[in-house]
Image: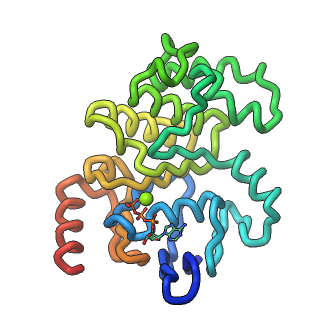
Amino acid sequence: MDLEKVYGSGPTAVRALKGVSLGFAAGEFSAIMGPSGSGKSTLLHILGALEEPSSGRVVIGGTDLSGLSDKNLTLLRRARMGFVFQFFNLIPTLSAEENVMLPVLISGEGTAKYAERLDELFSLVGLEKRRSHRPDELSGGEQQRVAIARALVRNPDLVLADEPTGNLDSKTGAGVLDLLRESAARYGQTVVMVTHDARAAAVADRVVFLADGKVVDEAREPNADEIFERIRTLESAG
Ligand SMILES: Nc1ncnc2c1ncn2[C@@H]1O[C@H](COP(=O)(O)OP(=O)(O)OP(=O)(O)O)[C@@H](O)[C@H]1O
Ligand SMILES: [Mg+2]
């Protein structure tokens, strides 16, 4: 990949990514950590084809994204990716169930065959009794779980999550992480999750550490203490 991302040009240009090369194996749960401004969200947006890299390529399941038209990128995003953002981006006038069904409606697929899938998802996120509630009738954690159900509804191959537990208390956050893990395990999804929380990162198969637009460290199946230790080392080195 060797991804570079420069925002702007001239003296105010920001090099957000300075040559990042990473592979994400199918079914693998990766966490991305690093200080504020290190390029985590930028990387996630590029992986999700929401932004184009300044140079380098993203290849997903053998498809080089740089070769695709905007239209085909949109189709690829809809067909194969699910997004969970820190601010849940739910539509306030729609019920929880309608929000979850949104990707299906947008895709133009028939909704009928999703009846069972909806039952399954709402039970997975533990919101069976909240399906007709609007976002403003749900707690923050419940809204986040609706957003996750929405990201998962069409069984994406790739789930991209930017601080999915950022606004949640530790218990609700742990529930959200279990959900992502469970879904990834059950459906063989590749998950890439940005987080500042060492305990959240500890549920991942691997943690990638970014600093100043570069990959500076990587750990396989680390526990939270090891992650804290590595962050401390990186901070004292920087
Ligand atoms: N649209 C943009 N235009 C100009 N600069 C940008 C833009 N988006 C991000 N940047 C810059 O790129 C760098 C990386 O930003 P990014 O959002 O990827 O950081 P991050 O690691 O996600 O940080 P945080 O933990 O605070 O969310 C930052 O220096 C930021 O100011
Ligand atoms: Mg960010």
* Residue 167 makes an appearance in the image: yes
Q: Quadrant of residue 91?
A: top right
**Outermost residue toward the top in this view:** 129
Residue at the image point whose x is 52% and y is 82% from the top: 13
- Residue 97, x across and y down, in percent: 61, 21
In the displayed structure, 76 sits above or below 143; it is below
**Outermost residue toward the front in this view:** 11
Q: Looking at the figure, which quarter contains the N terminus?
A: bottom right
Residue at the image point whose x is 65% and y is 69% from the top: 52
Q: Looking at the figure, which quarter contains the C terminus?
A: bottom left
In the displayed structure, 22 sits above or below 141; it is below
Q: Is residue 72 left or right of residue 24?
A: right
- Residue 31, x across and y down, in percent: 40, 56
- Total count of labels: 0
Residue at the image point whose x is 24% and y is 60% from the top: 227
Q: Nearer the viewer, residue 97 or 159?
A: 97
Q: Quadrant of residue 213?
A: bottom left
- Residue 125, x across and y down, in percent: 47, 25
* Residue 5 makes an appearance in the image: no
**Outermost residue toward the bottom in this view:** 10
Q: Nearer the viewer, residue 78 or 139?
A: 139
Q: Quadrant of ligand 2?
A: bottom left
Residue at the image point whose x is 67% and y is 28% from the top: 101
In the displayed structure, 42 sits above or below 177; it is below
